[in-house]
Amino acid sequence: MFHFTYYTPTKVVFGKGAEGQTGALVKEQGCKKVLIHYGGGSVIRSGLLDRIKASLDQAGVAYTALGGVVPNPRLSLVYQGIELAEKEGVDFILAVGGGSVIDSSKAIAYGLTNKGDVWDFYDHTRQASACLPVGVVLTISAAGSEMSNSSVITKDEGGVKRGYNNDLCRPKFAVMDPELTITLPPYQTASGCTDIMMHTMERYFCPEGSMELTDSIAEGLLRTVMKNAKILHADPGNYDARAEIMWAGSLSHNGLTGTGRGDWATHGLEHEMGGMFDVTHGAGLAAVWGSWARYVYQNCLNRFVRFAVNVMGVENAGTPEETALRGIEAVEDFYRSIDMPTCFSELGISPTQEQMETMADMCIVAGGGQKGVAKVLHEADCLKIYQMANH
Ligand code: NZQ
Ligand code: ZN
């Protein structure tokens, strides 16, 4: 077994109507004024924002609000949020939305409690020493930011998308009502399911070490997500499938399926695609994963064989190499079955050679000189993977 620290301080309130408890949950935190942070309007259209305000009113909690967070959330809005929250005397950030809103909230929370430019943390030139408390009302099952120690922000100039991980930003509570996700467009539901799978797959494909319990949890989670993603593809209003996916989203990224291990190369590759082309995160992962897998599988063959058999149900495929490749093909078949892309043209991008070189360079810079553990990747490897996906 790997050595690990497991820390998941987030209180989860799960089920239909859970958002009605938001006011009481914020009050429990003993704060004076809340910044409600939200996205481009789905929470207004659904009436959720009004319900959250009513719940805060009922609990006697004062608030101000800032919307406008976009997918691949921008640093410029983070700066605006910091300025507004300082002016208003905010001491708690309530994210009402998905990964982008939560990550923007975490960035604002860092900015309010540390002097200097908050981008320094994302640029990895210094560490945060504090973070204002953040709470979440989740509206999309995907990023897992509601329980993670992570925040991913895009700097407007140059489209530089960077993540910063620190336990200080783990949300105090996460309100999860699966019914809130029923209004999602099918593409966002499927992208979310892909991202959830990837958070466990990134942790699963490691070159060594036996983690029997963690492997079983990971394999069960992946089978559950695939089964329920297919149900939602045919029947988007299915509450039980929404609920399974929502809980999987949190458990896939709160450390449970990793316990000390992780590759994260596919995420590194996608973050450059998101920064340069503003693609939807989960779809971007689907478009590049197969190329990554074919490039690295021989370096951790046993893991790919185990995955093919235990997760994708591959039987009697012949040699270990053939079994591993059948497993990779099965994942791509699954992605196609829920209308996810498996290459750049299906994702809707066609990067030039120069753009791929830039992404490969930036991916390795962001990784601190290399990326991944299933196979350690350098710049030329990243470029090769982008080229393999570019059809
Ligand atoms: O902005 P609104 O109008 O709310 O629309 C959003 C947005 O367009 C819409 N949406 C959300 N809930 C909805 C809804 N539409 C209808 N009904 C609802 N209930 O969905 C769109 C996508 O929202 P977004 O928050 O961007 O989705 P997601 O949760 O996938 O977050 C993606 C971001 O999280 C980052 C990604 O890189 C990306 O920037 N990640 C964050 C991680 C973390 N902090 O731990 C880990 C991940 O690996 C990921 O990198
Ligand atoms: Zn992700």
Image: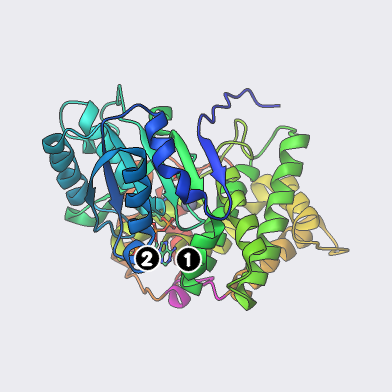
Question: Which secondary structure, mark 1?
Answer: helix
Mark 2 and mark 1 in contact? Answer it, CB < 8 Å. Answer: yes
Q: CA distance from mark 2 to mark 1?
A: 7 Å
Question: Residue 204 is drawn in which quadrant?
Answer: top right
Label 1 amino acid? Ala
The percent position of residue 154, horizontal first and vertical second, equals 27, 51
**Figure disc tally:** 2
61, 162: nearer the viewer? 61
Q: What residue is pinned by disc 1?
A: 283
> Would the CB of label 1 be found within 8 Å of ligand 1?
no
Q: Residue at x 77, y 50 (%)?
A: 306
As helix, strand or loop, the secondary structure at mark 2 comes to loop
Query: Would residue 99 be visible to someone looking at this image?
Result: yes
The tag on residue 279 is: 2
Residue 267 colored in magenta in the image: no
Tell me the quadrant of the picture where the N terminus can be found: top right
> Is the CB of the residue bearing disc 2 within 8 angstroms of ligand 1?
no
Give the farthest residue toward the right: 316
The residue carrying pointer 2 sits among few (fewer than 14), some (14 to 19) or many (20 or more) residues within 10 Å by Cα, namely many
Please name whichever residue, 244 or 145, is drawn nearer the observer in this view of the structure. 244
Q: Residues within 10 Å of mark 1 (few under 14, many from 20)?
A: many
Instruction: Give the image's coloring scheme.
Output: rainbow
Q: Position of residue 330 (x, y in %)?
A: 70, 67
Q: Residue at x 48, y 42 (%)?
A: 174
The kind of residue on which mark 2 rests is: Val
Question: Splitting the image into four quadrants, where does ligand 1 fall?
Answer: bottom left
Q: Is 362 positioned to the left or the right of 244 in the image?
A: left
The magenta span reads 339-347
